[in-house]
Image (tube, rainbow, N blue to C red):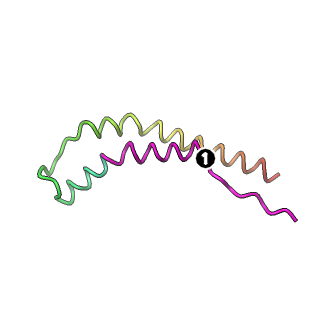
Amino acid sequence: MDSPPRFKLTVVFWIGLALLVLGTGPLLLIILAAELGLTSDPNPNPIGPGLLAFFTFWPAVILIVWGLIASVLRYRKQAG
């Protein structure tokens, strides 16, 4: 008896997720630190991390969606 195929996410999905975390993570950490009062400036203006998040967010979302679609299509093809 054959076991059902396992659902496996593609490499494209994992690259997109890594890009999202590495691209938006620094900005989110700065925002969180400012909210918790860990920075000397309660309203920081992080230009570098903001630009990094701006330029990586949509490419990361596109790669994640593309990877999910490819994973579902591959799973359906294997399932029959």
Dividing the picture into quarters, in which one does residue 70 lie?
Answer: top right
**The residue positioned farthest toward the left in the image shown:** 40
Residue at 27% of width from left, 36% of height from top? 48
Q: Which residue is mark 1?
A: 68
Secondary structure, magenta segment, majority class: helix
Q: Position of residue 76 (x, y in %)?
A: 75, 50
Residue 21 horizontal/vertical position (percent): 41, 48
Give 53 or 18, whichever is nearer the viewer. Answer: 18
For this rendering, which residue is in front, 38 or 42?
38
Taking the spot 66% from the left edge, 53% from the top edge, the residue there is 8
Q: Quadrant of residue 51?
A: top left
Q: Position of residue 43 (x, y in %)?
A: 16, 47
Q: Is residue 72 above or below residue 50?
A: below
Residue at (62%, 46%) from the top-left corner?
A: 10
| Point 23% across, 41% down: residue | 46
Image quarter in which the N terminus is found: bottom right
Query: Which stretch did the figure color magenta?
Result: 1-26
Q: Label 1 crowding class (10 Å Cα cut-off): few <14, some 14-19, many 20+? A: some
Q: Is residue 20 magenta?
A: yes
Relative to residue 57, is residue 40 depicted above or below? below
Residue 64 located within the stretch drawn in magenta: no
Residue farthest along the bottom direction in this orientation: 1
Q: Is 43 left, or right, of 14 in this rendering?
A: left
Residue furthest to the right in view is 1
Q: Label 1's element?
A: helix
Q: Quadrant of residue 19?
A: top left
Looking at the picture, tell me which residue is in the foreground, 15 or 53: 15
* Residue 18 vertical position relative to residue 3 in the rendered view, above or below: above
Give, as a three-letter code, the residue at label 1. Leu
Please state if 42 lies on the left or on the right of 8 as rendered: left
User: Residue 73, how many percent across, how many down?
Assistant: 71, 45
